[in-house]
Every structure is written in C-alpha cells, then in structure tokens.
Image (tube, grey):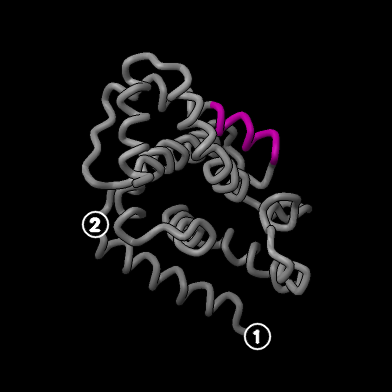
C-alpha cells in the first residue's frame, strides 16, 4: 500500500505538486541524513549534503525511472555520490569523529541503546574507516539502514553478487582489524 502511495506521490511531484514533494522529503529525510552523518561524522556537513541530495532529486525527478526498486534506493545513490564528492572536494581523509554520530540524539532510539559499550563502538567506528569506500557503504547500508543486497546493488550500481562479495570482504577485514 505504501509503495502505491509513494508512486502516486512521485507522479504528483513530477507534475509540480509541492505538497507531494514535501511528503516525499518528510518520508525519507531522516534516513538519508543518518546515512550521510554516519559517513561524514559531522552534523552540519550532513545537513548540507542532505539538502543537496534532495535538491538533486527534485531536479532529476523527471528522469527517475521506477524499476521495482524503492525510491529510497535512488536517494541513497544520490547521497552516496554526494558523500564521495564531499571527500574528494575537501581532499580530507575519513577519520573517526571525536563524538560518535551513532551515539548522538535521534539515531539510537531504543532503551537497549543504554547498554552499548561505548569503547567497543568507537573501536568499530575506527575499524570501519579502514575499509574501502564501497565496503563502508555496504556495511552501513546493510547493518545500520537495513537495506537488502538488491537495494544496495542499485545504490552502488553493482550486481547483487558483487555486493555479497564486498560484504564478505568487508566483514573479513573487520574481523582481522578487530582481532585482539
């Protein structure tokens, strides 16, 4: 049912319906922001890049082609490209932020979050930074955003088999890095 509603929203947004654009934004902004914040480690940068993602999505909405994948997968693809451009443009190396974005307000919402071992989490964050860009993206989209391998394949423009291989190599690398 939601998929039909989203398809209708997309159609209305293509026709210039600002209310439909606003609804699409409200449906997806939090997940895109979380992904970008996790990749950049900075709230302000994440806000700026999230705005750019939605601006580009609105500008390109006429070219969006629903091929059975969720609209969010297309937005993640745009977000992924913006994050890559951000790191390329600033010529910065990805480093772990002093304040872990996963522990900031709004990202962990369950009572179980209190039980997180902060030191282990920071260790995992640092280990993630040692993976390739594609490996980081696969791990983040799979385990923090809950996307399927098929949706991740659409985001990265790769086959589902390539995503499985990237995931396996990333998990093996993390195991090596985190091995005591």
Image mark count: 2
The residue indicated by pointer 2 is: 159
Query: What kind of element bears circle 2?
Result: loop
Among numbered discs 2 and 1, the one appearing first in the sequence: 2
Secondary structure mainly formed by the magenta segment? helix
Q: Give the x, y percent position of residue 25.
A: 50, 31
Would residue 75 be found to the left or right of residue 45 on screen?
left
The residue lying furthest to the top in this view is 16
Relative to 131, does residue 10 appear above or below in the rendering?
Answer: above
Q: Give the x, y percent position of residue 112.
A: 71, 71
Q: Give the x, y percent position of residue 76.
A: 43, 43
The boundaries of the magenta stretch are 43-51
Residue at x 36%, y 37% (from the top left corner)? 6
Dots 2 and 1: beta carbons under 8 Å? no
**Is 109 one of the magenta-colored residues?**
no
Neighbour tally class for label 2: few under 14, some 14-19, many 20 plus, Cα within 10 Å: some
For residue 50, which quarter of the picture? top right
Of badges 2 and 1, the one in the foreground is 2
Query: What kind of element bears circle 1?
Result: loop
The residue indicated by pointer 1 is: 180
In-front residue for pair 123/32? 32
The residue lying furthest to the front in this view is 1
Residue at x 46%, y 73% (from the top left corner)? 171
**Is 50 one of the magenta-colored residues?**
yes
In-front residue for pair 25/46? 25
Q: Give the x, y percent position of residue 43.
A: 70, 39
Residue at x 23%, y 46% (from the top left corner)? 68
């Amino acid at each position: 049912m939601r998929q039909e509603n989203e398809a209708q929203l997309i159609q209305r947004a293509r026709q210039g319906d600002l209310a439909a654009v606003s609804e699409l934004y409200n449906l997806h902004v939090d997940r895109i922001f979380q992904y970008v914040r996790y990749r950049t480690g900075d709230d302000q940068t994440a806000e700026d890049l999230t705005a750019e993602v939605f601006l580009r999505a609105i500008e390109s909405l006429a070219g969006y082609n629903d091929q059975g994948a969720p609209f969010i997968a297309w937005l993640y693809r745009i977000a992924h490209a913006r994050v890559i451009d951000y790191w390329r443009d600033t010529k910065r190396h990805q480093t772990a932020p002093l304040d872990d974005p996963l522990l900031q307000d709004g990202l962990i919402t369950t009572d179980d979050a209190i039980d997180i071992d902060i030191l282990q989490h920071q260790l995992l964050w640092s280990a993630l930074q040692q993976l390739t860009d594609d490996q980081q993206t696969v791990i983040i989209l799979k385990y923090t955003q809950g996307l399927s391998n098929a949706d991740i394949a659409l985001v990265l423009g790769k086959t589902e088999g390539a995503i499985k291989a990237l995931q396996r190599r990333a998990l093996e690398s993390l195991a090596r890095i985190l091995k005591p």
